[in-house]
């Protein structure tokens, strides 16, 4: 038998003997209670045999004083009794875990990246220790809710940047929607993006629609290869995990994106599509029963009241959370509080660079835009004249997003004043001029993004 289980049981029996709780037979022997032990990663549960309780009354089993005494006998391990159909005595395997306080903030550095699991990142710290999140496994579809300022976007940003720091774009693709426009701007520099972060409803609908098309494309390829699950494809031919993040999905009420999200939630898993949906308003009609039924992982930051907590978690408690980044979650199947990992603004550049080391590519339209700026605008990357020259091939917003992204990458200079244009740097000039006419071009260190993806507007 498990020696750890025996040690715990001895401690429990010893405590009962010490307190004189056990019935004595006529021959002087004590009648011992009997139990079946269930060992789980965090706890051992002794399911007590109700017919063989050794004369210990139900009230005694439930007495907090008994548990304090058992705890002392078990080197600080917390115990409690669950009392429903029968009695079960639960021992926390980590000593003193129950008393650990969660840190007020968990800041993650590149050295803290989770080593195991290609798509496993750190969600944060729970009382039982670090809580990982497998973006391709059980936690492939997540619903994140909480009031304004409770930490949704900050936490999602940390999840995304950990994933991009671990996976090259050939293994991970990102589709990001952020209608607030501010929270994910820095992520625009990541080569994993299938398109720039969508900040307008129309772009977002198009991007979510693209994810559905991609799912259908993958399904066709997989059917032809007679594979039913993405993760059973050989590593060399397996599609990258496609992670779609929609920050504030309530903004899509009544839009066709809702139907697309339902499809992705229901059928995305088999073709390697993962989903993070965030909202301030979990009661909105966007979170239909269908979406909720197919998005089992829940992360609730501070909610305005218990009703909202119940809508998102099917239980109250999230209304009592006190600080940004503190959440209640059922990640790994157990309800727990977690202080979610955070990447401060000043470290964003370093994290983005970790994900961006692969080297980005220029598509056809992008090469033409740069050449136009060099030949007709004296190297200035000015939005309006570029838009006029390329009308019908690229939207104004897409040029603006591109300019922001290239500025982040150091391909365009940052203007000193808001009215000054960004300018093409020698690095971007070399990339664009090095491209053969009409061909996509790859940056120095080799890129895994399909050439031309950026031009598929
Ligand atoms: N995981 C975290 N840990 C600690 N602090 C955090 C965390 N995430 C965010 N914060 C802090 O809380 C502030 C608000 O966070 P954030 O923007 O993520 O909120 P939000 O829930 O997305 O709000 P909104 O619904 O208005 O977009 C941030 O400025 C940041 O400093
Ligand atoms: Mg936000």
Image: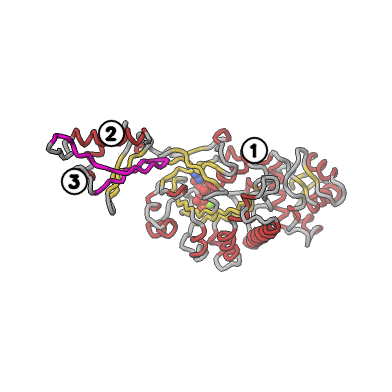
Q: Decide if ligand 1 comes within 8 Å of the CB at mark 3.
A: no
Rounded to the nearest angstrom, the CA distance separating label 1 from label 3 is 60 Å
Q: Position of residue 253 (x, y in %)?
A: 55, 66
| 45 to the left or right of 303 | left
| 49 to the left or right of 124 | left
Compared to 279, does 93 lie above or below? above
Please name whichever residue, 127 or 48, is drawn nearer the observer in this view of the structure: 48
Rounded to the nearest angstrom, the CA distance separating label 1 from label 2 is 51 Å
Q: Which residue is disc 2 drawn over? A: 10
Q: Quarter holding the N terminus?
A: top left
Q: Position of residue 133 (x, y in %)?
A: 52, 45
> In percent of the image, x 13 and y 35: which residue is there?
27
Please name whichever residue, 75 or 415, is drawn nearer the observer in this view of the structure: 75
User: What residue span does the magenta drawing correspond to?
Assistant: 27-50
Q: Nearer the viewer, mark 3 or mark 2?
A: 2
* Quarter-of-image position of residue 198: bottom right
Q: Answer whether residue 14 is magenta in the image.
A: no
Q: Nearer the viewer, mark 1 or mark 2?
A: 2
Q: Position of residue 374 (x, y in %)?
A: 84, 47
């Amino acid at each position: 038998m498990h020696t750890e289980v025996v040690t715990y049981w001895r401690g429990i029996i010893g405590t009962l003997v010490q307190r004189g709780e056990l019935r004595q037979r006529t021959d002087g022997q004590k009648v011992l209670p009997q139990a079946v032990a269930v060992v789980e990663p965090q706890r051992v549960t002794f399911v007590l045999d109700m017919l063989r309780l050794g004369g210990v009354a139900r009230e005694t089993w439930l007495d907090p004083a008994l548990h304090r005494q058992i705890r002392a006998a078990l080197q600080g391990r917390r115990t409690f009794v669950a009392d429903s159909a029968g009695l079960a005595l639960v021992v926390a395997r980590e000593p003193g875990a129950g008393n650990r306080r969660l840190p007020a903030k968990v800041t993650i550095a590149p050295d803290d990246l989770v080593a195991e699991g290609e798509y496993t990142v750190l969600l944060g710290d729970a009382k039982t220790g670090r809580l990982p999140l497998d973006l391709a496994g059980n936690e492939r579809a997540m619903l994140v809710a909480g009031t304004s300022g409770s930490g949704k976007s900050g936490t999602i940003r940390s999840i995304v940047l950990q994933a991009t720091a671990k996976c090259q774009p050939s293994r991970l693709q990102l589709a990001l929607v952020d209608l607030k426009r501010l929270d994910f701007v820095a992520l625009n520099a990541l080569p994993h993006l299938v398109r720039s972060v969508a900040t307008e409803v129309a772009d977002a609908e198009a991007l979510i629609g693209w994810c559905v098309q991609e799912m259908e494309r993958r399904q066709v390829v997989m059917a032809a290869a007679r594979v039913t699950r993405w993760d059973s494809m050989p590593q060399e031919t397996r599609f990258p995990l496609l992670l779609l993040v929609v920050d504030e999905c309530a903004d899509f009420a009544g839009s066709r994106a809702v139907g697309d999200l339902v499809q992705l939630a229901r059928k995305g898993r088999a073709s390697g599509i993962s989903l993070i949906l965030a909202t301030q308003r979990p009661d909105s009609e966007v979170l239909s029963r269908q979406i909720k039924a197919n998005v089992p992982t829940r992360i609730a930051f501070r909610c305005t009241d218990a009703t909202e907590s119940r809508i998102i978690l099917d239980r109250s408690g999230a209304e009592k959370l006190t600080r940004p980044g503190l959440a209640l979650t059922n990640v790994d199947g157990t309800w727990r509080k977690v202080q979610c990992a955070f990447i401060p603004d000043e470290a964003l550049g370093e994290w983005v660079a970790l994900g961006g080391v692969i080297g980005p590519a220029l598509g056809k339209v992008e090469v033409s835009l740069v050449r136009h700026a060099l030949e007709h605008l004296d190297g200035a990357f000015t939005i309006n004249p570029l838009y006029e020259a390329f009308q019908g091939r690229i939207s104004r917003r897409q040029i603006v997003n591109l300019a922001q992204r290239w500025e982040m990458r150091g391909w365009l200079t940052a203007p000193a004043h808001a009215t000054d244009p960004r300018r093409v740097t020698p690095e971007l000039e070399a990339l664009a001029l090095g491209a053969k006419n009409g061909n996509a071009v790859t940056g120095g260190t080799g890129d895994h993004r399909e050439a031309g993806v950026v031009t598929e507007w």
